């Protein structure tokens, strides 16, 4: 069991309170063949791919089938119900009827439309998306420890990858080598719901450029945006691997990105507006004439998802809180020429912030 009973009970109580559950209310959080596993895992500890958490004002249940009942009884610290041969949705609705549930809370931004309409036929529906996101946003010390571990594993895997890069000819090969090395150092793999970004040469101008068949060339660089996953939690790191001597102007741009990231990191503390953090990084690039080449927000939260609250962008309404774990990832992208990004992970503490990915070198040279 990754999460203690006490920690899961605390999460359930927060959800009950934040969603203001009444005596005839329940929150329904399903995982459907792996879809929306994050919230199901967060509130139950279940790591399988099919089941549902039902949370009432004073009880909690986990429904699954015979494939997972043994697993669930070892992971879920509350009552596990075998749905037998009934469909998960039908069994869940039947249980909620027995519990006299009249209103069902759902994650409106996650639940499939077919399930929404099926539930709406039976009960009044209300949305708990904001409440779930708010609770998951603030990381406990246990969660922070898992994200730190993910950063350490990413460091080890990237080191192995750079050391073994000789003979690697294409972006897809590097992507595969990185995934392999993550497994070899003890990670549960990479991101579960996103592909890594591996882009070299002119393709590095694509902020989300997935690995292609492009071959590497001496004198260019590879922008690698990746992360390790450990017990469900991820890190999100971007580094640029220099293949020999790269052009001086791009060396200077790399240094400028480090300066922009540091400017944003310097003002991290509870209460600071996320848009001010974005501006701190953006201002450095603007002064150097690169503002229009920085085409995305400066960062975002991480946890079970690669992208969580808060959002660190010029339009964000968020303010930083103790327990946030965020990225800072300024970039410069010149279409047809190339691009670079630097990304690290930061924990917001009572006194400021801590970079929890600082063990990963920022200047990486390799020879192919």
Image (cartoon, helix red, strand yellow):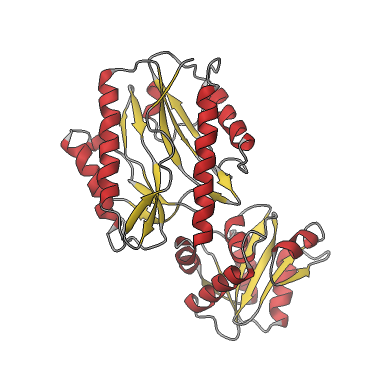
Horizontally, residue 12 falls left or right of residue 201, namely right
Residue at x 83%, y 64% (from the top left corner): 85
Q: Residue furthest top?
A: 218
Is residue 363 shown above or below 45? above
Residue at x 33%, y 42% (from the top left corner): 296
Whether residue 256 appears in this view of the structure is yes
Residue at x 57%, y 61% (from the top left corner): 39
Whether residue 304 appears in this view of the structure is no
Q: Residue furthest left?
A: 287
Horizontally, residue 248 falls left or right of residue 215, namely left
Task: Return the residue nearer the eye: 151 or 241.
Answer: 151
Horizontally, residue 39 falls left or right of residue 246, namely right
Task: Return the residue nearer the eye: 174 or 357.
Answer: 357
Q: Position of residue 150 (x, y in %)?
A: 53, 45
Q: Position of residue 164 (x, y in %)?
A: 55, 22
Task: Return the residue nearer the eye: 235 or 69.
Answer: 235
Picture quadrant of residue 333: top left
Q: Residue furthest bottom?
A: 23
Q: Quadrant of the N terminus?
A: bottom right
Task: Return the residue nearer the eye: 113 or 212.
Answer: 212
Residue at x 73%, y 82% (from the top left corner): 98
Is residue 207 shown above or below 168? below
Q: Position of residue 290 (x, y in %)?
A: 22, 34
Is residue 82 shown above or below 267? below
């Amino acid at each position: 069991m990754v999460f203690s009973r006490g920690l899961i009970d605390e999460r359930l109580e927060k959800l009950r309170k934040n969603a203001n559950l009444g005596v005839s209310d329940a929150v329904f959080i399903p995982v459907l063949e792996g879809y929306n596993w994050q919230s199901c895992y967060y509130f139950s500890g279940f790591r399988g791919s099919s089941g549902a958490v039902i949370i009432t004002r004073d009880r909690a249940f986990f429904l699954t089938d015979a494939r997972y009942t043994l697993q669930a009884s070892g992971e879920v610290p509350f009552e596990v119900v075998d749905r037998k041969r009934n469909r998960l949705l039908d069994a869940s609705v039947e249980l909620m009827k027995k519990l006299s549930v009249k209103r069902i809370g759902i994650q409106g931004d996650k639940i499939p439309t077919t399930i929404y309409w099926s539930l709406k036929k039976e009960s009044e529906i209300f949305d708990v998306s904001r409440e779930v996101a708010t609770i998951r946003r603030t990381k406990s010390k246990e969660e922070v420890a898992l994200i730190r571990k993910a950063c350490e594993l990413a460091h080890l895997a990237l080191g192995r990858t750079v050391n073994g890069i000789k003979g690697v000819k294409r972006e897809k090969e590097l992507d595969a080598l990185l995934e392999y090395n993550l497994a070899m150092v003890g990670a549960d793999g990479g991101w579960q719901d996103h592909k890594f970004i591996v882009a070299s040469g002119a393709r590095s101008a694509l902020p989300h450029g997935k690995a292609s068949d492009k071959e590497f060339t001496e004198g260019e660089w590879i922008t690698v945006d990746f992360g390790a996953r450990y017990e469900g939690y991820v890190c999100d790191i971007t580094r640029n691997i220099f293949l020999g001597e790269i052009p001086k102007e791009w060396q200077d741009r790399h240094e400028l990105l480090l300066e922009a990231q540091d400017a944003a990191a310097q003002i991290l503390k509870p209460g600071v507006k996320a848009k001010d953090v974005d501006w701190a990084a953006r201002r450095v690039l603007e002064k150097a004439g690169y503002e229009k080449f920085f085409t995305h927000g400066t960062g975002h939260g991480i946890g079970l998802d690669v992208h969580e609250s808060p959002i660190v962008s010029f339009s964000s309404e968020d303010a930083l809180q103790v327990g946030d774990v965020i990225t800072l990832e300024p970039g410069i992208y010149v279409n047809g020429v190339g691009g670079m990004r630097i990304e690290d992970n930061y924990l917001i503490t009572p006194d400021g912030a801590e970079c929890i990915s600082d063990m990963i070198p920022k200047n990486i040279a390799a020879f192919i």
